[in-house]
Each structure stands twice: as structure tokens, then as C-alpha cells.
Image (cartoon, helix red, strand yellow):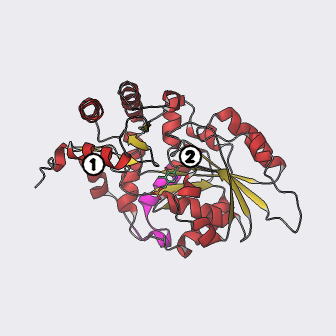
Amino acid sequence: MRNYPERSSVIDLRSDTVTKPSLAMREAIFKAEVGDDVFGDDPTVVKLEMIIADLLGKEYALFVPSGTMANQIALRSLTQPGDEVILEKDSHIFNYEAGSASALSGLQLLPIKGKRGVITKEQIEAEIRPEDIHHPRSKIISLENTHNRAGGTIFPLDEIKRIFKLAKENNLKLYLDGARLWNAVIATGIPLHKWAKNFHSVSVCLSKGLGAPIGSVLAGDEEFIKKARRIRKMYGGGMRQVGIIASAGIYAVENNFNRLIEDHRNAKLLAERLSELKGIKIDLESVHTNIVVLDISESGKDVPSVIKELKEKGVLVVPFGKTKIRVVCHLDVTRDDILRALEKFKEVFES
Ligand SMILES: *Cc1c(COP(=O)(O)O)cnc(C)c1O
């Protein structure tokens, strides 16, 4: 029998989605006023939607169960089957949504390989289809900020502005998967509305770094949100007394947004120290926010056995391709936890 560490001593760096509602958040949940949100009767959901719409500088917003559903509702609301979506090859929509853009909306996805998750105006321009009955119709350009698979990297605002202009000139809709847009705001000091201004519509997650248990919000103009509300129902995402979780979302925005800076500091510390260990390579310039991706191809070890060894020492991380491991800092790991995790990495890589 192996002796696994106690659950409480485990340092879980797999994702910023593993956070658990704090006592204070649970108190907000306990007190939430609720009603049937499919009838539009839940005051807490309405409040959350107004808060997010205001922060993003959009007319309206819609509370949905997940980031994946937010993305898929947006795509469905803006397209016809056979339309094409231009996006980055490592994007969440292309890789991690179970093929749903094709399955649910009949869309063709046109992936462009970016650098650290960033695709340029010129790269996109080269892929926009001319009007011709042979071609699918280019309809949406979808960007991701921060970029998950590239390691939490920030999409520069100047490039976004150039792409916005391109989209406008070509009558395309520019969509933002902003699951971790919060982190880009904290890292750059550029507020949410300045990013969102360049996009037709935007989604943000409450259940990543902000630490709410469930939920994403989709924002845009009145016509778009009206359509999105109908598609949400079609996808089974119309929820009833859901103020019970929207309350956690409000608590998260009000209390856990500014503290993301701590996660960024922890990630930087982790990245710098880990990159000094034998056999670990890290692109330090890509560590913009709370995610660190380690390449262990020169360590002589394979990813599954490193993950297993770390787990036995009480540190959880996830595989990220054949030679890489992803580590994510969040609300439920302290600087002390990070220092302890570093000791465990040292034991694995330098013994
Ligand atoms: C997490 C994430 C999503 C949504 O994920 P869900 O698990 O469906 O909430 C979407 N886009 C990006 C970039 C993400 O990181």
C-alpha cells in the first residue's frame, strides 16, 4: 500500500478551476435572493448580468453555465451552417470544446498558427474568403485573451485594434473568448471595457481565477443577447433559481479580481525557480499571468512518470502535450504552497 498524502496537504496546481468557494462566498450564496431566471425573475442573476455588462461596456449580458457554452452560444447566434470561423490553432474553441462548433452550428473552423497565441492582422487578412459560391463564407474572427494553451499569454491591445479595423472593413464579427480576460486586465492595467470595445461580443469566466464554483457571462448588444438567450434555452442552459450561483459570481468579481496579481507573482516565482532546475525548460517571456508551461524533454523523464512522482509528493499538475506540463497558480495556493511545491519539483528533477 502506498501512503498518499492527506487531501488537505495536497497542492493542486492543475488549473485555476479547482478553487473551492470560501466561507465568505458561501455566505453570499446563503443570502442570495432568487427567482425563476427563465422567467427573468431572479434578481441576483439580473444584477450579475448588469455588473458584467457595465464592466465590459456592453449593452446586455447573459449568465450561462460554462465558458464552452458561452462560446458555442455566441458562434451559433452569429452564423449559418457552412460559415467559417477564423481562429488561432491552439485556441480553446478549436481544441477543447469537443468539436461542438461543427456539431452544433455546422461551422467550418479555419485555424491559423499563432505565436504565443497571437495571430496578426496580416495572417487573418490572408485567410478572409472572397465572395464566391465555391467558398464558405468568412463570418467570425475569434480571439482568445489571455491565451490558455499558449500559457496565459496576453494578446496585445494594439494588434486587437488592427484586427478590429480589418473585421469592420470586411463585415466580419470579432468575438473574444475572454475566459481569463480578468488576468489580462490585472497584468496590464487596461480595464475590461477598453479590451471589449474592439469586439462585437465577449465571454468571461467566473470559475477560473475569480474562484466562483460555476458560471460564465456572455456580453454584447441587445439584438445579440436576445438571440443568445434563445440559443441558451435550445442548448439546455436556461436555469431556474440560479441566483444561488450568480451570487458567488458577484462575490468573485467584487472580492477576487484585484487579488489575481498574487497569482501572477506566484507564477513568476515558480517559473524563475523551476527554469533553474536540471532538464526543465520554460519560455520565461511567455509567463504573463498565472500559468507556467514546462518543457521536460531534456530531463530524460517522461510526462506521465513526472506527474505520478509529483502526485505521490502531494503536488498535482497536468500533462500539456507529449513533453510538457502545465502549472497554474490560483486563489487556493499561497506563496508558501508554491515554495513547498518547488521543493518537491527539486526532489523529482535533481535526485
Ligand atoms: C476554461 C476556458 C473556457 C471555458 O471552459 P469551461 O470549462 O467550459 O467553463 C473557454 N475558453 C478558454 C480560453 C478557457 O480557458
Q: Report the residue at 40% width, 32% height from top.
A: 280
Q: Which residue is mark 1?
A: 308
Q: Judge by depth and name the residue closer to the eye, 307 or 129.
A: 307
Q: Which residue is mark 2?
A: 54
Q: Judge by depth and name the residue closer to the eye, 103 or 234.
A: 103
Say above or below: 246 vs 83. above
Q: Answer left or right for 21 relative to 74.
A: left
Q: Quadrant of residue 65?
A: bottom left
Magenta region, residue range:
35-51
Q: Is residue 67 magenta?
A: no
Determine contact: label 1, label 2, CB under 8 Å. no
Q: Position of residue 53 (x, y in %)?
A: 56, 50
Q: Answer left or right for 107 relative to 231.
A: right
Q: Report the residue at 30% width, 49% height from top.
A: 25
Q: Which secondary structure class fits the magenta region best?
A: helix
* Whether residue 61 is visible: no
Q: Quadrant of the N terminus?
A: bottom left
Q: Secondary structure at mark 1?
A: helix
Give the CA separation, mark 1 to mark 2.
45 Å
Q: Position of residue 311 (x, y in %)?
A: 25, 46
* Whether residue 227 is visible: yes
Q: Amino acid at mark 1?
A: Lys
Q: Is residue 43 magenta?
A: yes
User: Mark 2 packing: few (<14 Cα in 10 Å), some, or many (20+)?
Assistant: some
Q: Secondary structure at mark 2?
A: helix
